[in-house]
Image (spheres, rainbow, N blue to C red):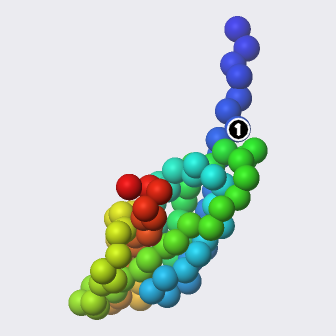
Amino acid sequence: METKRSTNTIWKFPLDVEDRQIVQLPVGAEILSVQTQHEIPCLWAACDTDAEWEGVTIIIHGTGHPMFDVPMQFIDTFQMKGGALVFHAFVGVTNEDS
């Protein structure tokens, strides 16, 4: 029996350490994790390789820093500089998402 291959693939998207940024992801991408690789924060997502692309708002807050008062959904926590810096990544939630 032949197994059909999915068009889903896990892709990596490097992030900047900024309060807010727009990351281009395929429509419907499932965000899996945010971690550092070689001291660079990266987002991993399961993506439909045939999908159109859209901008997704990623919000990063450092521990002890004020948070934006906007709708957002937690993704993951990541550390940099050997654990000296701890950040928390969120995806901004629009009215369409709620």
Can I make out residue 21 in this image?
Answer: yes
Residue sitting at x 67%, y 45%: 48
Residue sitting at x 54%, y 60%: 44
Residue sitting at x 44%, y 55%: 97
* Residue 91 sits in quarter: bottom left
Residue 36 at what x, y percent from top left? 49, 73
25, above or below 60, in the image: above
> Residue flagged by tag 1: what amino acid is it?
Thr
Front residue of 52/47: it is: 52
Q: 24 left or right of 94?
A: right
4, above or below 63, in the image: above
Residue 47 at what x, y percent from top left? 63, 49
27, above or below 21, in the image: above
Residue 4 at what x, y percent from top left? 71, 22
Front residue of 1/89: it is: 89
Question: In which quadrant of the rendered image does the N terminus lie?
Answer: top right
Which residue is at the far left? 64
Residue 82 at what x, y percent from top left? 38, 84
Q: 33 left or right of 46?
A: left
Front residue of 85/16: it is: 16
Can I make out residue 38 in this image?
Answer: no
- Count of labels shown? 1
Q: 31 left or right of 53?
A: left
Question: In which quadrant of the rendered image does the C terminus lie?
Answer: bottom left
Which residue is at the far top? 1
**Element on which disc 1 rests:** loop
Residue sitting at x 51%, y 76%: 41
Instruction: Return the residue at label 1.
Output: 7
